[in-house]
Image: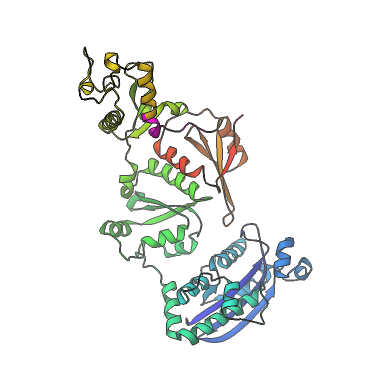
Amino acid sequence: MLPSITFLDLETTGATPLKDRITEIALVRFDGGVETARWQTLVNPQMDIPPFIQSLTGINNAMVAHAPVFSEVAGQLLAFLDGTVLAAHNVRFDHGFLKTEFKRLGITLQQKVLCTVKLSRLLYPQHFSHGIDAIVARHKIEGIARHRAMGDVEAVLRMLDDARQELGDAVVQSAAQKLMAAPVLPAHIDAGLIGELPETPGVYQFYGEQDVPLYIGKGSNVRARVLAHFSGGKATAREQRLVQEVRRFEWIPAAGDLSALLLETRLLKQQKPLYNRQLTRERQLFSWRLDPLSQPQVSLVAAGDINPSQMGRLFGTFKTRQQATEALRKIAERSQLCLRLLGLEASAGGPCAAFQLKRCKGVCCGQESPESHSLRLQQALIAHKLSLWPYPGKIGIEEYNLENDLRQIHVFEHWVYVGVADNDDDLQALRAQTTTLTFELETYKLLLKVLPQKKTRVLDLAP
């Protein structure tokens, strides 16, 4: 494998590094392919271990009561990790806990990592599952303490031993090197920041000379998205220019994909970065408003005049007046509606031109009642009808991320985005705030997609 690599596993009180703590550490270090150290220790988490975790791992409060706390083993752990690659099964989990624990001690852990879950997928692509249980079953591993730190390390080591025998050492090393391949960063980028990038949802921002905003992006895994920009590959000329112009970058964590998308949208409008220009152009918008008692029976409404609380009277969203007019004309032709009553033909005496061609049922010359024409018009438009707001007032959409312990509630009213709350005080302020209802098509479409999803947590904020 690699010149120096440490296989490590942690047991913890839960899944959230910011709230939970380590209860056990086990590692095996290899130098030049030879095992040179093996170490394990229980760790006092200085908090109760939940009953479910005790049942799963077999580690209870009594076992860790007299164990060293993390600060007492931190120096020894750093010595084992020094100069090595840290390998773990789902390394994001273990590395995240270690970084958090060391950060509490004022130490920034910067360690090259290798995920053995990803390594297993590369070596055994024919298999669907690559968790420890699946590996134990697949490789018929016996005699290990499952859900204990050293037992899980040994399971990974046995899987890799089998892989060397079945596939050859060169194949295993090549797969590991592929996963370890680091992006080539421009000389002016602080490589130290790469180690700080979170593997959680968020928004990242690239800046050029004199802090000119160049690009804003989002991702479920900010680290992966940022590194993808610097990986080369099949980058276009435009993407290559962007990378060369970047002088620094920063990121903002988010509680989930919706939070990242809304934050990205807001920052794009505020900063208008050079390489996002095509995404930030202001678009005009038109819709048809139905009023059966008026003449004409429909009128074109521009975006600024759309009242989101009266969406049930609006039909279609169009980028231009011409597009809206052509769409209505086609609807009229299919349904034999009168262009004159729709305002698409100048008023004159006698039947409209379409009646002569049997494309109008004659509301313009007394052959059809206005009420009948109005009903047929509503029926013809129904497929284009915009949705009414399905709630009595404001709602919140809540997202919570276990990995970064971030909770955000996004408040909406009549398809309009009101704002985001990171705490209860902010939520109450947004709940009481009087909202200027300005329709935005992107928000409307986003909510139509998000609200029906089972995973969406909707909070009723109506008074």
Q: Residue at x 39, y 56 (%)?
A: 248
Q: Going by the image, does 401 lie left or right of 329?
A: right
- x and y percentages locating residue 315 in the rendered image: 38, 30
Q: Is residue 33 visible?
A: yes
Q: Quadrant of the C terminus?
A: top right
Was residue 385 drawn as part of the magenta stretch in this picture? yes
Q: Quadrant of residue 88?
A: bottom right
Q: How many marks?
A: 0
Its colouring scheme is rainbow
Q: Is residue 160 above or below residue 307?
A: below
* Quarter location, residue 227: bottom left
Q: Position of residue 255 (x, y in %)?
A: 54, 50
Q: Residue at x 52, y 79 (%)?
A: 5
Q: Nearer the viewer, residue 340 or 185?
A: 340
Side of 16 where 370 appears, left or right: left
Q: Is residue 222 magenta?
A: no
Rendering coords of residue 114 (x, y %): 50, 72
- Looking at the image, the residue that sits furthest to the top is 349
Q: Look at 62% across and 64% down and name the residue there.
A: 101
Picture quarter containing residue 17?
A: bottom right
Per the rendered image, the range of residues in magenta is 380-390
- Of 247 and 179, nearer the camera is 179
Left or right: 21 with respect to 130? Answer: right
Give the camera-side residue of 186 and 341: 341
Compared with residue 348, is residue 246 higher up or lower down, i.e. above or below? below
Report the residue that reaches farthest toward the right.
Answer: 62
